[in-house]
Image: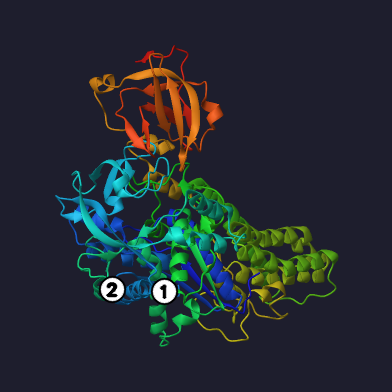
Amino acid sequence: MADASNRLLVTAALPYANGPVHIGHLAGAYLPADLFVRYQRLNGRDVAFICGSDEMGVAILMRALREGRDPQDIVDTYHPMIRDSFADFGMSFDYYGRTTSATHAETSQDFFRTLDAQDAFDLKTNEQLYDPEAEMFLADRFVVGTCPVCGYDEAYGDQCEQCGSSLSPTELIDPRSTLTDATPALRETTHWYLPLDRMQPWLEEWIGTHPEWKNNVLGQVQSWFNEGLKGRAITRDVPWGVPVPADVAARHGLEAEGKVIYVWFDAPIGYISATKEWAAAQGTPQRWKEYWQDDDTELVHFIGKDNIVFHCLMFPAMLHAHGDYVLPEHVPANEFLNIEGQKLSTSRGWAVWLHEYLDDFPDYGADMLRYALAATLPETKDADFSWDGFQNRVNGELADVLGNFVNRTLTFAHRYFDGAVPEARDLSDVDRDVLAQLKQTPATIGAAYEDYRMREAVFETMQLARLGNKYFNDTAPWHTRTDDPQAAANTVHICVQLCASLSILMEPVLPDAAQRLRAMLNLTNVRPSTPGEAPDTALTWEDAATPLLDAGHALGTPSILFEKVEDEQIDAQLDKLQSPDPTPDDMGYEPLKDTITFGDFMDLDLRVGTVTTAEPVPDADKLLRLEVDLGFEERQILAGVAQHMAPDEIVGRTVVVVANLATKEMFGLESQGMVLMAEDRDGNLSLLSTDSENGAVVR
């Protein structure tokens, strides 16, 4: 368990301010972070929980250009929507900022200035793609083309989404602008680069000090190490972003006009600038340094798996190069959340938007969704959210287990013990066993939270309510109240204590219900799980291990903790998800490409061949060099299958080759065609084969 004496700085990934929040966002980074932070505050930790809107991203500029709007208009629309949705959901941020603030621009520029003064950057002049119609240089996501590794013709300028290769825009074959579809031209420009290649030895050594990190995090980081890190440009020639400081540009004899600090560099600095704004708002403008520059701080980044490389390699490299900042102690990253068995897709409306959900479930809706998601978090692999599962969680667990236990306990106390906690005497073995289990429960749940096993923590919390229901049933106070009144009093006394402990232990996941339960118990002076001070005498997480209410304590009025969700409400949510025009992507398949004519197909010359040689291509992790016998000639073909099959699995196989594909050069070798592969929904490749002779035409 972490040292509670250390201050804790927790960040949740900055969401792009180009659309509203959906439940995939919540399950990836935000709800896990809030569960963890609320637990830590109940433990008495000094916590700063920081987040904010990422407003400088390429996606925002792309949307603005597509819609003919100013980027500032886009972020001014979505920043308050995101901020307010988070607040309504119960996110307990100490501060939620935005990266268009003056503080953020100043902080990013000062950070950039410091690294430049320390010669931490490489300055490179090279040719980059320029859109003559849009009259602007094209950032990597503004360029698509054919991947030089696998031949996929819709690869982006930073990465091929088919084979995963890291790319630069100039490496693409037949590139085109996503803005105008124009063929870009090469123009000379100068940019600053962070030399991750030279920093790799330090990064590997530092990552090696954290074997406790999640396997999905370490695995992805190791794959980047295996491929070899490359210097990464941190400035761009685009019209939206934090401007490159003029004095830094002048130091190198350059003009700063038109150059901005690229989003992947400035966005994580948003954590720092937001912390500065938080400290200033409290009247302690220098306090931010305690959380970012004091070694007694534990820094934790909560992210989704698509942000691993930025938070485990690039931002730590930046912090290390600067020299004044603490490094992250943990980067717990979650996988992706699917909906009703299908991949979440905002473009076709296959998503559950948070603000719409909260409108549809105004009564205790935040707690219900928090619980359903927390019990389904994609912690080690992709998970699935379904509305039937949501209804079962709410009705079968929140209402029938937790709510039922609270209601029967407090109703019985009011009916037979004058609405007060009865005195417990002469406890039975069963009574003592329940109290012994209660004593262990806070530590058990806490250990799960400390180890970032949120689902387990939520399960163990509900187990205490299950224990209470079983104990109530087994001791049957409705019988013993006449036959053995003291036994009935003992049952109610212990069940009320379980309710009191639950009102603290369920606070991280069900903050609203926890407060309502404490009102029913007339239990006060509990340390808050939200930002704010608490007296030293306030009850903490550890206090939940022991009885909290004295005999004779007057209880409040009981009420229903959770109403059940009706079938009609679930049907209405399912209706929202129905896609009127199902596509292959609905089932996880790659979407169909544009329709072609029969003549287009007949232009392809597909031939049968036998692989006679297969061997790795030096310096290319994904490529194999194949020699294929087409019957009438031998062809050398480079295939991006090295991560899917070994060379000896391919030699001797009969394959289908695109024989009239233009020759391409990759890694100094010519590829004289393409071997056809089938890719399943999990990304696994397999060879297409036939029993025909070499050279046979495939029609």
Disc 2 crowd rating (10 Å Cα; few below 14, some 14-19, many 20+) is some
Residue 155 is situated, as x and y percent measured from the top left of the image, at 33, 42
Give the foreground label among 2 and 1. 2
Q: Is residue 684 visible?
A: no
Disc 1 crowd rating (10 Å Cα; few below 14, some 14-19, many 20+) is many
Q: Residue at horizontal 58%, vertical 86%?
A: 535
**Residue that numbered label 1 is attached to:** 272
Q: Residue at horizontal 19%, vertical 59%?
A: 69
Helix, strand or loop for disc 2: helix
Image disc number at residue 248: 2
* Mark closer to the chain start, 2 or 1: 2
Residue 474 is situated, as x and y percent measured from the top left of the image, at 77, 58
Residue 593 is situated, as x and y percent measured from the top left of the image, at 31, 33
Q: How far is disc 2 from disc 1 in space, using C-alphas?
A: 21 Å
Q: Quadrant of the N terminus?
A: bottom right
Viewer-side residue, 422 vs 365? 365
Residue 166 versus residue 429 in the image, above or below: above
Helix, strand or loop for disc 1: helix
For residue 161, what is the image quadrant? top left
Looking at the picture, which amino acid does disc 2 mark? Answer: Val
